[in-house]
Amino acid sequence: MPTRSTDASGILHALMLISRRGVADARTAPTVLSMTEQSIVAYLVDNPGSRSVDLAREFRLNRSTVSRQLGALIDLGLVREAPGPGRGQPLELTDAGRRAYDETVAILQRVVDAALADWSDADVARFARDLARFNAAPADPDASGETRHEASAR
């Protein structure tokens, strides 16, 4: 009988496989967004008005890395800075950014739909609840919130 550790490793492997399938399908499709860009755009969809510092904190990246990624998205006309007070302007998707996001999500959704094609509605509902519970779990208690670069600079 598998141990909890073996099962947890199996979950990680399955999540990596799902991601790899999605990345492979998205790469071959005529979509504008890379998976990195997709992650940033998805964060902006879920967190309207976020600033670059919010992205850096969420993804635990150096601000310069986020700035380069945002610069590319702005150059592509997918993201723009919105008016706002203080330093660091709120970010929002353009109409083209929303279309690119929707196209990429549709590609990834087809991967998930194909994998679930033979599952019962009850199985899909249970899996959705379990994934929601998994994603709602507290963050790694050892994570300091600082970027790897910031931590290594100490």
Image (cartoon, rainbow, N blue to C red):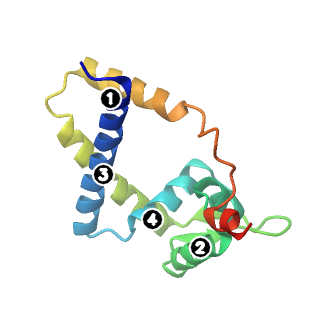
Say which residue label 3 marks. Answer: 108
State the residue position of label 2: 65
Q: Mark 2 or mark 1: which is in front?
A: 1
- Camera-nearest label, 2 or 3: 2
Element marked by disc 1: helix
Distance, label 4 to label 2, CA atoms, is 11 Å
Q: Can residue 107 be seen in this view?
A: no
Mark nearest the camera among 4 and 3 is 4
Q: Name the residue under label 4.
A: 36
Amino acid type at image mark 4: Thr
Q: Which amino acid does label 1 sit on?
A: Asp
* 55 in relation to 2, above or below: below
| Mark 3 or mark 1, earlier in chain | 1
What distance separates the C-alpha of mark 2 from that of mark 1? 35 Å
Q: Distance between the residues labelled 2 and 3?
A: 25 Å
Position in image of residue 13 (x %, y %):
30, 43
Q: What residue type is labelled 2?
A: Thr
Q: Which residue lies furthest to the bottom in this view?
A: 75
Which badge, 4 or 2, comes first in the chain's sequence?
4
Q: What element carries label 3?
A: helix
- Distance from the alpha carbon under mark 3 to that under mark 1: 25 Å
**For residue 149, what is the image quadrant?**
bottom right
Is 125 rendered above or below residue 83? above
Mark toward the start of the polypeptide (2 vs 3): 2
Circle nearer the viewer, 4 or 2? 2
> What's under tag 3, amino acid-wise?
Leu
